[in-house]
């Protein structure tokens, strides 16, 4: 009797589990059927109709659009819907612009801006900030390396005179080269302030064609003569304090020249200065320096005229 009762208990347990399984499956089926159905897309509908038809693609949607577009001037022509009925209010498919935005899903906001707005936004950044921005990620690198942004930064930091220039390696490389030559030119005047003859000797190219014309008008030609002239200038007891303004630089492949105005606190007045540099062995060397007294009265007449 104990064996029979044990068998019955196992049988009852199996039937109870089976009943619960069917109930669960039934409830899940009801839940799935109660969900709202998704409308078939245009591609799915056309695929269905082409498979059930004679092999030709369905052109009902196309014909419907053509009828609406080619209507009279008084308004669009009513056309029958696929499910019956007519209506003149036709909802168009997403335009090409919407499709482009969908393809750009996941792109940064910087890339979605039009080029003019992106260039204007990047123009507020300085040289170090723009370089740091390019090192954040690939999207920011692409935006920060935009040629128009570097052209705008060049005009802001240096000059507008070279707006028509088309740099061979782009405006970013041209900006870097211009900044490098401007820094070298600044070091030249720092050597004068510090009266550092060793630094001045390393700045000049050791060649026989280098030339130096000081503000006195005396010409020195050749490396040794030029360095001796600077030694005499540094031995002058009276210190010279000056300011540099209106710096303009032009950089070619292996040559650059910089023009500027120096205002010295002596009675001789301001000077026009031109420095010429050549690129050798990975660095810039000075090959020509020319300083002359500026005709202040002549420039004032030109400005007034």
Image (cartoon, rainbow, N blue to C red):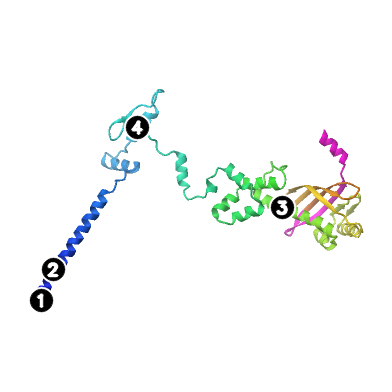
Task: Estimate the spatial distance between the alpha carbons at disc 1 and disc 4, rounded to whole Å.
Answer: 77 Å
**Residue at the spot of label 3:** 179
Badge 2 element: helix
The mark found on residue 3 in the picture is 1
Q: Residue at x 22, y 58 (%)?
A: 24
Q: Mark 3 or mark 4: name the one nearer the start of the chain.
A: 4
As for residue 290 lying within the magenta part, the answer is: yes
Badge 1 element: helix
The mark found on residue 64 in the picture is 4
Q: Mark 2 or mark 3: name the one nearer the start of the chain.
A: 2
Q: How many marks?
A: 4
Badge 4: how crowded within 10 Å, few (<14), some, or many (20+)?
A: some
Badge 2: how crowded within 10 Å, few (<14), some, or many (20+)?
A: few
Q: Mark 2 or mark 4: name the one nearer the start of the chain.
A: 2
The location of residue 201, given as percent across then percent down, is 83, 61
Whether 3 is drawn above or below 290: the answer is: below
> What's the magenta region?
278-305
Badge 4 element: helix
**Residue at the spot of label 2:** 11
As for residue 38 lying within the magenta part, the answer is: no
Looking at the rendered image, the disc whose residue lies closer to the viewer, 2 or 3, is 2
Looking at the rendered image, the disc whose residue lies closer to the viewer, 3 or 1, is 1
Q: Mark 1 or mark 2: name the one nearer the start of the chain.
A: 1
Q: Are marks 2 and 3 in contact (CB under 8 Å)?
A: no
Tell me: 219 left or right of 153: right
Q: Residue at x 22, y 55 (%)?
A: 27
The location of residue 206, given as percent across then percent down, is 82, 59
Q: Mark 3 or mark 1: name the one nearer the start of the chain.
A: 1
Task: Estimate the spatial distance between the alpha carbons at disc 2 and disc 3, rounded to whole Å.
Answer: 91 Å
Camera-nearest residue between 264 and 175 = 264
Badge 1: how crowded within 10 Å, few (<14), some, or many (20+)?
A: few
Task: Estimate the spatial distance between the alpha carbons at disc 1 and disc 2, rounded to whole Å.
Answer: 12 Å
């Amino acid at each position: 009797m104990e064996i029979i009762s044990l068998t019955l208990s196992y049988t009852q347990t199996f039937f109870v589990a089976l009943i619960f399984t069917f109930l669960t499956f039934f409830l899940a089926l009801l839940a799935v059927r109660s969900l709202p159905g998704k409308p078939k897309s245009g591609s799915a509908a056309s695929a269905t109709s082409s498979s059930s038809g004679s092999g030709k693609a369905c052109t009902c949607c196309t014909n419907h659009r053509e009828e609406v577009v080619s209507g009279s001037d008084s308004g669009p022509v009513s056309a029958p819907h696929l499910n019956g009925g007519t209506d003149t209010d036709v909802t168009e498919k997403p335009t090409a612009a919407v499709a482009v935005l969908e393809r750009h899903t996941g792109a940064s906001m910087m890339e979605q801006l039009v080029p003019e707005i992106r260039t204007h936004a990047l123009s507020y950044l300085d040289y170090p900030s723009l370089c740091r921005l390019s090192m954040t990620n690939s999207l920011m690198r692409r935006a920060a390396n935009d040629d128009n942004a570097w052209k705008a930064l060049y005009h802001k930091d240096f000059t507008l005179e070279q707006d028509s220039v088309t740099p061979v390696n782009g405006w970013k490389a041209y900006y870097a080269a211009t900044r490098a030559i401007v820094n070298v030119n600044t070091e030249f005047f720092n050597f004068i302030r510090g009266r550092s003859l060793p630094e001045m000797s390393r700045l000049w190219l050791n060649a026989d064609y280098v030339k130096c014309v000081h503000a006195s008008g005396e010409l020195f030609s050749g490396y040794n003569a030029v360095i001796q002239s600077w030694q005499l200038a540094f031995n002058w007891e009276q210190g010279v304090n000056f300011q540099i303004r209106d710096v303009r630089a032009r950089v070619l492949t292996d040559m650059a020249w910089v023009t500027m105005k120096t205002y010295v606190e002596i009675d001789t007045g301001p000077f026009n200065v031109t420095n010429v540099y050549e690129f050798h062995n990975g660095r810039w060397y000075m090959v020509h320096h020319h300083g002359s007294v500026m005709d202040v009265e002549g420039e004032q007449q030109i400005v007034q005229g």
